[in-house]
Image: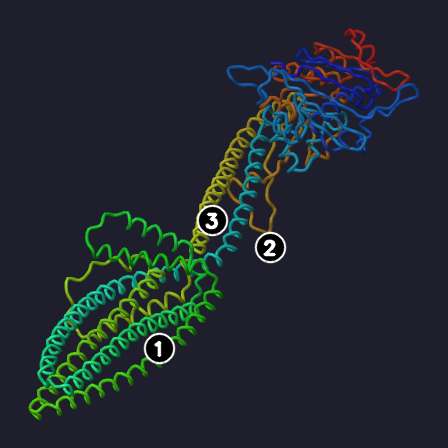
Amino acid sequence: MQMLKRLEIVGFKSFARKTTLDFSSATTAIVGPNGSGKSNVAEAFRFALGEQSMKSMRGKRAEDLIFGGSHSVSRANRASVAIVFDNPDIGGRRPFKIDFDEVAIERVVHRDGTSEYSINGSRVRLRDIEELLAGANSGETGHQIISQGEADRILMASARERRAMLEDALGLAIYEFKKQEAQRKLEKTETNIAQVESLRRELAPHLRFLERQVEKLERTDALRIELANAAQTYFATEEAYLAAEKRTAYEAAQAAAARLAQTAVELAAIEENATTDAEGARRLATVRAAEAGVEKAAAARAELARELGRVEGALHAAKQRSARIAREPYAKVSREDLLALAEEAQRQLEAPMESGALRAALDSLSKAVRAFVDRFISNDNVLMADEEQAAYALENERAALLEREAQLADEQDQRRSALARSREALAAHDETGKEMRRRLLERAEAKAHEEARVERAQARLRELAQMEEMLELEKRDTVALAGLAALSYEPLPGLPQEEREAQAARRRLVERLRIRLEETGGTGEDVRQEHKEASERETFLARELEDLAKSADGLRSLAQELDAELAKHFADGLARVNASFGEFFAILFGGGHARLTLEESDADADEEPVPSGHDAVLRQGIEIDVALSKKKVRSLVQLSGGERALTSIALIFAMSQVNPPPFLILDETDAALDEANARRYGDMIESLAKKSQLIVITHNRETMRRAGILYGVTMGGDGVSKLLSVKFEDAVAVAK
């Protein structure tokens, strides 16, 4: 199959004008006199295929590849060479792994030394060219281009260079490309692994810090639950106690009031019967006036006691709020707590009312919400100032009330003394004397005793009311810290049979838990969110690291598999090349033998250990062992120039037979052959042309005779190479 279609040259070396060579024959010969520029055709191929060595193209710098001009033709600013291949689809496969029926590889060089590469007009990298050619068995070592004077390049190359040429000829370069690509990916993966590990190391301390903070918040949550549970028991017990005490105090007040009324009636009857004269009536009026004064003083003192209880409750609440502000600024109470409290209150309020006790809890909850909102929207400093000002005003009011209470107490005592004197006077006026006085004093004392009982019962009721108010304040403070769970309890059916000290201990526990919870700060939702994000980041990085590690392991396995494949195919190809090499060598030399051998390691004990397995095979270079039938040869340097040329030809042809390249360019490799060897060379060309397209640059008539197409290259006085179509006879004449 003929893949090479044409070569297009513009401004390259001596080809100043566009020159096109069509290759429609298995063998094409290019002939012309020395200096005409025919070898520039071979170098144009080398240039387009990505050759980087200027020496290989007989130049020192990029400008040497561009037509330099002459007396009649101006110099070019760029040189371009395009090789066009046929790329048919045969059974779903193409020679070049690109979905085009024709593949044009072009390289352009500018006078500043920069090169541009393209495939079918699209800019590509040199590596893309190399990979495309490697897939079609046209590698970068240039084994398919053998120029004049370097036919024995493969012979004189180093063992490692020779191995690379052989791998290229065997079509194994694609494995090297895949291996290099895997190695690049592995290096990039290892770099990514290092970066991810670095990110994890940077994240780890912060994550540990956040974990400790979250642990504190979890302890705070546990403390909040503990407070809610303790508060439920305390509130339920206190409500039951207050309810029972209120009933007892109310009943005592009712009973004392009833007894007081009865005693008052009895005392009035005695006083009515004590005397009927004018003096007696006057004295009785004095008693009645004294009694009214005592009752008035008692009423005033009771009203003052209620007011004093109110002021003392408000003062206690203000002091408690001030202390709480000092311990924990309200600004730390999070918006989430407020929203949760409001939402829970809304849900509770929307629920159906089942009993008065549920209703009472909701009333308490509503008060707590309002108080919480009032505090939350205030500034800490303003709150503190307001609370201190309120406490100061309440202190002044309390002092005034206490002073007034002392005055009323003195006044009440004075009125009671006056009442006692009036009653004694009334009793003394009565004729009955002692008996009347005894009865009057007895009832008066009974009345005073019942009045004291009524006053104590009312004072107890006021005290209980103050305790209820304090309980509501405690509920609000607790709800602000523990949430509505603190109020999620059922009223107790009765008062627990226990000492009051047990409830005092519960109150102290609730207060301690509130203080501890205030000291921990808010809910820490920002810390929780940051911890969540950091944890998710750590999880992502750990998963990324695991994926990268798996990818790295896969790439290492791929590299090992490629090494194994490369070693296997290389060993197989080496055996086949040796078979053909020996055969061609015997034909050209009329006997003898030649073969390729793996380089032996000469590492001594002080050097690094010699690799084993596939790696050892892949590192070994190639040595050439030849033996002539009529000449003893110890090394290749002992061969003459002609012998080296024949050996090189035999080896090149052998490699081409094993894995034929799409085309093979032979630049005057037959120059040193005599007539007999020229015929053998011609036979080998005909055999080789069955597997690869041949472009032979030659002066040899026998070689020309084997070509299907002849191109003649001439150069005029303007220094520009021209391509001519010549007949075979004319070509022979030009070659002479």
Distance from label 1 to label 2 (Cα)? 107 Å
Determine the residue positioned at 84% across, 18% down.
36
Q: Which of marks 1 and 3 is nearer the N terminus?
A: 1
Give the side of residue 38 with respect to residue 101, left or right: right
Q: Earlier in the sequence, mark 1 or mark 2?
A: 1
Instruction: Check disc 1 and report its element: helix, strand or loop.
Output: helix
Distance from label 1 to label 3 (Cα)? 66 Å
**Amino acid type of disc 2?**
Asp
Determine the residue positioned at 52% across, 47% down.
193
Which residue carries the number 1 mark? 401
Distance from label 2 to label 3 (Cα)? 50 Å
Closer mark to the observer between disc 1 and disc 2: 1
Q: Which of 707 and 717 is in front in this view?
A: 717
Instruction: Check disc 3 and report its element: helix, strand or loop.
Output: helix
Q: Where is residue 47 in the image (x, y as percent from the top left)?
A: 73, 26
Q: Position of residue 470 (x, y in %)?
A: 30, 68
Residue 28: assigned label: none
Residue 537: assigned label: 3
**Amino acid type of disc 1?**
Leu
Q: Which of 21 and 300 is in front in this view?
A: 300
- Picture quadrant where residue 246 is located: bottom left
Closer mark to the observer between disc 2 and disc 3: 3
Q: Position of residue 166 (x, y in %)?
A: 62, 30
Q: Which of 248 and 446 is in front in this view?
A: 446
Give the side of residue 79 with respect to residue 182, left or right: right
Which residue carries the number 2 mark? 606
Up-down: is 266 above or below 607?
A: below
Q: Which of marks 2 and 3 is nearer the N terminus?
A: 3
Up-down: is 457 above or below 657?
A: below
Q: Position of residue 266 (x, y in %)?
A: 9, 79
